[in-house]
Image (cartoon, rainbow, N blue to C red):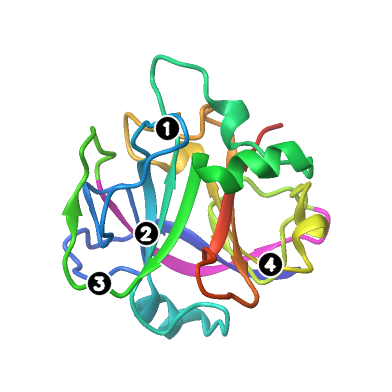
Amino acid sequence: MIATKKIIPAPDQSIANPEIYFGGDEAKVAEWPKNPDGDYLTLLFSIDCRAIQSKIKRSDIPDSGFIHVFSTYSRQEYFLDYITYSGNADELKLISGGYTFVIHSDAEQSIKSPIESMPRLNMTLIDYEIGESEFSMASLVSEIPPNGVLAAEALSEEYNFFCQIYSSDFPHPFQDALYLTDALGFLFIRKARHEGERLGLFFVQTA
């Protein structure tokens, strides 16, 4: 069995500092990120570094501040190819070019999203075990990439796996935020970050 932390809705939605929250209409960034086409990105989820470190103790996660994960999203237009990575260099170029965006910020002030936002849903972590050969569709945090992450080995030299997010776990009506309701999104954190480099990579894979 592999010990992980499952990401589930917090029983108390009024909590001020959840470890992770999905959606929300503001982020601690200097300006709202856009993709290479000039479209504003949608805020998928945020991680309170201090709160999550009290639960998991990861050396690759900052001790304070927030990690915000943004992605290209549209209800009208096809966008899956821009956010998918399965080990192909051209796919990685799109992801790295800004169709998804991962940022760590210690800023005290937040700015509002300029586009329609996903309703905020506070999440929490609980102990969760998955079998060695199991393909879990749960949203979870793990030190070991779950089965089915096609690009894990290709990224292992520069990145650590951090979490997977199941699209249907996003609040209504954004269960299609990863294009398909049964898609999985993966966050990888850079092992050693140099000035100007982003903290991590976020991308999507589908069955």
Q: Secondary structure at mark 2?
A: strand
> Which residue carries the number 4 mark?
159
Magenta highlight range: 120-133
Indicate the quadrant containing the N terminus: top left, top right, bottom left or bottom right.
Answer: bottom right
Disc sitting over residue 175 in the figure: 1
Q: Earlier in the sequence, mark 1 or mark 4?
A: 4
> Which residue carries the number 2 mark?
46
Which dot, 4 or 3, sits closer to the camera?
3
Quarter occupied by residue 29: bottom left
Q: Which amino acid type is shown beneath numbered disc 4?
A: Tyr
Q: Which amino acid type is shown beneath numbered disc 1?
A: Gln
Q: Earlier in the sequence, mark 2 or mark 1?
A: 2
Q: Earlier in the sequence, mark 2 or mark 3?
A: 2
Which secondary structure type mostly characterizes the magenta part of the structure? Answer: strand
177 or 3: nearer the viewer = 177
Disc sitting over residue 107 in the figure: 3
